Amino acid sequence: MLSVEQQLRIIKRGVAEILPEPLLVEKLKRSVATGVPLKVKLGLDPTAPDIHLGHTVVLRKLKQFQDLGHQIIIIIGDFTGRIGDPSGKSETRKALTEEDVLKNAKTYEEQIFRVLDKEKTEVVFNSSWLAPLQFSDVVKLAAKYTVARMLERDDFSRRFKEGRPISVHEFFYPLMQGYDSVALKADIEFGGTDQKFNLLMGRHLQEEYGQEPQVAAMMPILEGLDGVNKMSKSLGNYIGINESPKEIYGKAMSVPDELMLRYYELVTDVELDELDQIRLGLENHTLHPRDLKMRLAHILVRLYHGSAAADEAQAEFIRVFQQRDLPTDIPEHGMARDSEPVWLPKLLVTLGLAASNSEARRAIVAGAVKINGDKFTDPDSQLVLTDDMIVQNGKRKYAKIKLQ
Amino acid sequence: MLSVEQQLRIIKRGVAEILPEPLLVEKLKRSVATGVPLKVKLGLDPTAPDIHLGHTVVLRKLKQFQDLGHQIIIIIGDFTGRIGDPSGKSETRKALTEEDVLKNAKTYEEQIFRVLDKEKTEVVFNSSWLAPLQFSDVVKLAAKYTVARMLERDDFSRRFKEGRPISVHEFFYPLMQGYDSVALKADIEFGGTDQKFNLLMGRHLQEEYGQEPQVAAMMPILEGLDGVNKMSKSLGNYIGINESPKEIYGKAMSVPDELMLRYYELVTDVELDELDQIRLGLENHTLHPRDLKMRLAHILVRLYHGSAAADEAQAEFIRVFQQRDLPTDIPEHGMARDSEPVWLPKLLVTLGLAASNSEARRAIVAGAVKINGDKFTDPDSQLVLTDDMIVQNGKRKYAKIKLQ
């Protein structure tokens, strides 16, 4: 087992907040002294069966704990899923059916083991201790928190002030999640920074039930490919770990330059020393952002599809883009999926690659226009559009068609 | 079975509010047409094992329904008692132990049958349907109401605004009470006017669970002997139905004149026509308030101890007060229980029966001073005070000593 200092260096990588840090140090010391691993808890609400890189931020952190010899416990919130976490939501969520929850949970389980070591991970369903609770137990649990403190939670507070309904049962969500920590006697609970209230509830309830409280550890929320919003499936700005090597590689190449280091830190297993070198290289321009991004893309494909797939995705990318001298940041242009064949000059104008039909015709005749790298010289060409079709006029004007 | 109109006349006697009255009429019509009695529910929280006249206001109303042929169902809130009704309270109530609740419930049961007909009354414990509820049932129940509407309740609203804590489990009380109506398929629920929120919750939940909602019927809150505050044991302004005939009679004689008619209406079984006569007699001064109060006192003793005891209490009262020519409204004067013997003239001054020691001495020597009806002529008398000791100076000045 590594020393407390060595462990802390790894644990603190990329972490947003640890509450309270001295207690973490104390627990680590005790663990080193006794050889008893810490119980590190993560609750997953089985509502989103497609895990993306945003989810892996905390999963990778757990993997680091696992490699340090600690006990990872994944709670599949099959019971809480029937309520739906109201965290950050502006409306009461629809309850999932038991069937949905179980199906999602199974898919979830398969995916988390692409990050975590299955042999060393304990997976539990919180229905196993929540479902048998009787009304009287629930009353005792609910007695341990006040309405006013519950309404201090950002999302509840906002909804309450704006007069939007909060159902009484939504108060159970944080109580249940907190009770999970009691049931497991967790030492540390991880979550995103948006989980702070729920993680602190765990501490509160553990104390109420006479246990040493857990450490609440929060990971940052990963921005998606748009560089602004939280990565999420519904916003379409995500890289799913179940996507194909080509998709992962291509999407990774569209990560904004300014987020690249953050992605290296939060969703790869690059060593800390290497991270420092990358940071330095970007600052003093000894490393080229595109090279670093290709390396990031390669790492991400390797993580979820292995080295061979990563090499292949990279080779394909180089073939399509670099050997054809294509830039990697071609603007995308949405087009109707069911449209008729399009007259090429008109297409160039629509895509903003030519100012007028006549300018477009001249460019075509001059041999400056390529479709997917193939030269088109007939100004009367009619084209059937395909998804990801790349249209080029000269060396600088590109557009990629996205069928919608 | 009486006609709907005849029933309504009896039912509406003394009632504060019926919500909604047309539904009550509809239910009564259906009952008359089918011969199926209405289910009339009253929930009792077994926290106050001594029933006083305040409680009998609603119990007498149920007795009237019972006499009309309807089915009375008394719910002993053994399960809700573990939370404690927060209605009108400014603080979270202490949960009762299961043992306390059961003991209180038994005492309660014995007492209600001094008003209701035991043979025709169904007594149920709400733990029988609430205790078996699982966490998931509780979640479903809580989903049927919002936090904001819960906080509209007067007492919650006040506590919330004043920053006094409301525990989350207190929200269960109205939900449980409402669920009782669902479990029983109640037609009418009775309660005090302070129960309005809980009674309407029953209507709401019955609709949510696909039932015809109950009628919420509210009885006024009976003022106690002080004529101002709600009758309650803790305020000491009550007449307990388990008190001795002498106590009930004596206390009834201290009911303020202006409340007498209200007491006749709410806590006796005097017929409606007779009530009208009493009202008229008081208005045109053809009936003397003291006679009416003695009759009230007699009726109350008769209700809880029978005619013989009522006659005896009345005779005793007449002997002590009227034959000694004592007024019935002697002002009481608190004195320390452990005091030394008191010099009689000083006592008269202290009680305000004489302006000075010398005036008091003259009155004593003149034979105007009586203690408990016995003349004291020695101005140097030393008296040991006793509780209820009546001190008299002449025909108009009286004081009753209350040891404290």
Image (cartoon, coloured by chain):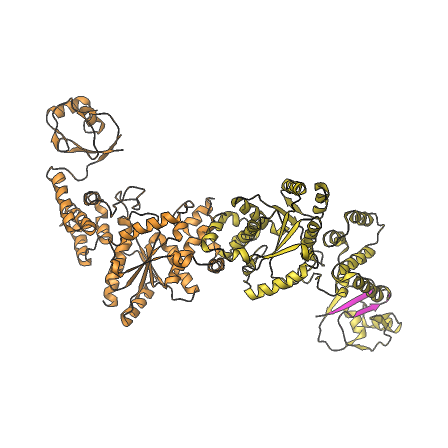
Chain colours: A orange, B yellow
Quarter of the rendering occupied by the C terminus of chain B? bottom right
Viewer-proximal residue among B216 and B107: B107
Work out whether residue A153 can be spotted: yes
Q: Position of residue A368 (x, y in %)?
A: 12, 28
Viewer-proximal residue among B150 and B270: B270
The quadrant holding residue A62 is bottom left
Quarter of the rendering occupied by the N terminus of chain B? top right
Left or right? Give the position of B365 relative to B162. Answer: right
The quadrant holding residue B298 is bottom right
Q: Outermost residue, right direction?
A: B366
| Range of magenta residues | B385-404
How many labels sit on residues? 0
The relative height of residue A295 versus residue A132 in the rendered view (above or below) is above
Left or right? Give the position of A353 relative to B312. Answer: left
Q: Position of residue B160 (x, y in %)?
A: 52, 53
The relative height of residue B79 versus residue A394 in the rendered view (above or below) is below
Viewer-proximal residue among B345 and A89: A89
Q: Position of residue B105 (x, y in %)?
A: 61, 62
Q: Residue at x 60, y 65 (%)?
A: B103
Viewer-proximal residue among A371 and A20: A371
Q: Position of residue B186 (x, y in %)?
A: 60, 48
Work out whether residue B254 can be spotted: no
Left or right? Give the position of A190 relative to B336. Answer: left
Decide whether residue B46 is among the magenta residues.
no
